[in-house]
Image: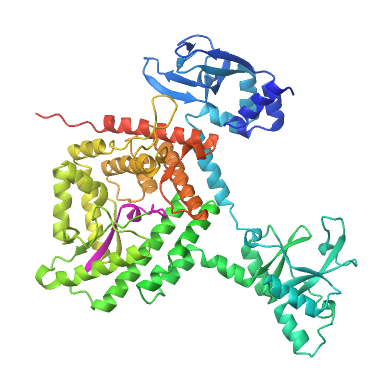
Amino acid sequence: MDIELLEIREHLARFAPFDALSDAQLDDLVGTIEVAYFKAGSEILALGEQIEDLHYIRSGAVEISWRNGELFNRLSEGDIFGHFSLLRNRKVRFPAKALEDTLIYFIPGERFHQLCEADEHFAEFVELGQPRLKSVVEEQHKSNDMMMTRVRKLVSRRPLMVEESTSVQEVAQRMNEENVSSALVLSTREGDPRYQFSDPDGQSWTLQGIVTDQDLRNRVLAEGRSVSTAVAEIVSSRLISVQSDKSVHEAMLAMLRNNVHHLPVLYRRRPMGVLHLSDIIRYETHSSLYLVSNIFHQPDTLGLARLKPDVRQAFVRMVEEGASSHMVGSALSTIGRSFTRRLLELAEEALGPPPVPYCFMALGSMARNEQSIVTDQDNALILDDSFDPAQHDEYFAALAQHVSDGLDACGYTYCKGDVMATNRQWRQPLAVWKGYFSEWIDQPRPEHLLHSSIFFDLDSVHGEEAFVEQLQDLVASKASQSPLFLAAMARNALGRTPPLGVFRTFVMEKDGKQNNTINIKRRGTAPMVDLIRVHALACGSRAQNSFERLDDIAKTQLLPAGTGDKIRYAFEFLSMVRIRHQAIDLQEEREPDNNIAPGNVSDSERHHLKDAFQLLSNAQKFLKFRYPMPSRR
């Protein structure tokens, strides 16, 4: 293949749907491609004209229009267009012009149809509108469904290996020097074929067994053997091992069944490490379930604060294992609730039992089960209507302060907007809360809309859950019957727009602190949460989680067919970009944040980001259309 065709092939292989084609399919394809150049402003496809080729953007930018001339989409490097027309009557349905000087690869229509017939992934991509996000999210979920942690993930170093003629003294010395508790014993003699392997120099070996520090104690010192005894004399002939691709669960069962604490890990037949029972225990301590259990065993706030590194390790582990944003958000929210409940238990132990019933209420991302590792605290107290401020508020003020200070010590920073139970305004009887909520819906002023965006994501953490359920019921029934409130909330949700530039670039932050980055929360996930909330309020959903709200919305006709799924895929992708970025920050010992630099992500991920932001932009435009301001009479 000549250098020009090779360059075309390498470029195609970077972008969907060509990135999933086989090597043979790519080789066959590149020889059929023709190239054309279009100056900025020139027409590429005119409405109604005959189209014979799939168009692939090699460089530049292209604007796609509706039949009426309004903008439909802006495309850039790696994008395709013309496929909808090729799949129908070969007449251009969406006109296209070059926004910049643009280089186009023309893929013959015949070859395009052959790929649709031969490759299901390719066909699905071109037959569905904006399928890239769907593909990338579903692939992640498929891998997550099949996810099983492999033993090799727990192996952090090469094993200590000694020849069978080595003295037990030398083995003990080497174990001490390398700070390990075992050594694998090798022989040049032929033995069990399951344990025969060749080293990089071509020398053949047989793994005879393993010697541990317990063996040195029990079989050498306790029996009075000489330190010059060959290690072969104390090695058990019964060798239990595990292949590196087996699951951690299988390895643990092998240890329990055979009553061993050390397990040689083999790649095929070559030793690659030794797994100790403590490795599995350490691994399990980084799981969210273990962490939640550990939280409730802490005797004080200091003990809880010491678990902050464990929370971060559990977060990184979930991301590395391919957990979805829903799984990560739910796990972190459960951890956050557990910290809060334990702090409330400790506060009640110190202050005594509460003078009247109460419910400690979580707001925002914790209530939605969508927390990330970068989060602050948003909470409030609902008190029984028998609450008397003169008699009881000193107790609840102290309880709120204890919890808020404790959460801050555990990594949940104080809310900059003072939306915490320490604020007297947000520590009120149930009747007052009902008055708040009703007033905010009946009188949707800017301040009330801001409160609604915060407090209408609410959930019980501890205490009388019925208090929160009554507020949830009030919101679900009253908001859906208020067109003025929904219209105001819809417009309020348009305050944060996705970072899409006029052409094909991203709009970067220019606040002096994070220049040339995108705040993926402020410009992506947060406005997505806002627009989903509006639709959920409109359909009377009592769900708090955004994905569950989308499930409720799907049962209605609030959105055009298929739109809810597209929002779901875009939200999942943006959430995972945010989560992965924070995990990388932690792994590289940086303080995690919400700012990503597009230059630091791959070409395909930049395209996925653009798709997600474009979908968010379209969804925001529809929001204003779907909930118009009622006319005044």
x, y percent for residue 138: 52, 42
Residue 602, quarter of the rendered image:
top right
Q: Is residue 527 above or below residue 221?
A: above
Q: Residue at x 52, y 67 (%)?
A: 285
Q: Nearer the viewer, residue 314 or 69?
A: 314
The colour scheme used here is: rainbow
Residue 619 horizontal/vertical position (percent): 35, 33
Foreground residue, 509 or 216?
A: 509
Residue stretch in magenta? 358-374
Task: Please determine whether, in this image, residue 590 is positioned above or below residue 382.
Answer: above
Residue 197: quarter of image: bottom right
Residue 591 on image: x %, y %: 43, 54
Tell me the quadrant of the picture where the N terminus can be found: top right
- In the current view of this chain or complex, which residue is farthest to the top? 49
Q: Nearer the viewer, residue 59 or 140?
A: 59
Relative to residue 335, is residue 444 drawn left or right? left
In reply to whether residue 457 is colored magenta, the answer given is: no
Specify whether residue 120 is in view.
no
On the question of residue 510 being in view, the answer is yes
Left or right of 12? Residue 614 is: left
Q: Position of residue 553 (x, y in %)?
A: 34, 41
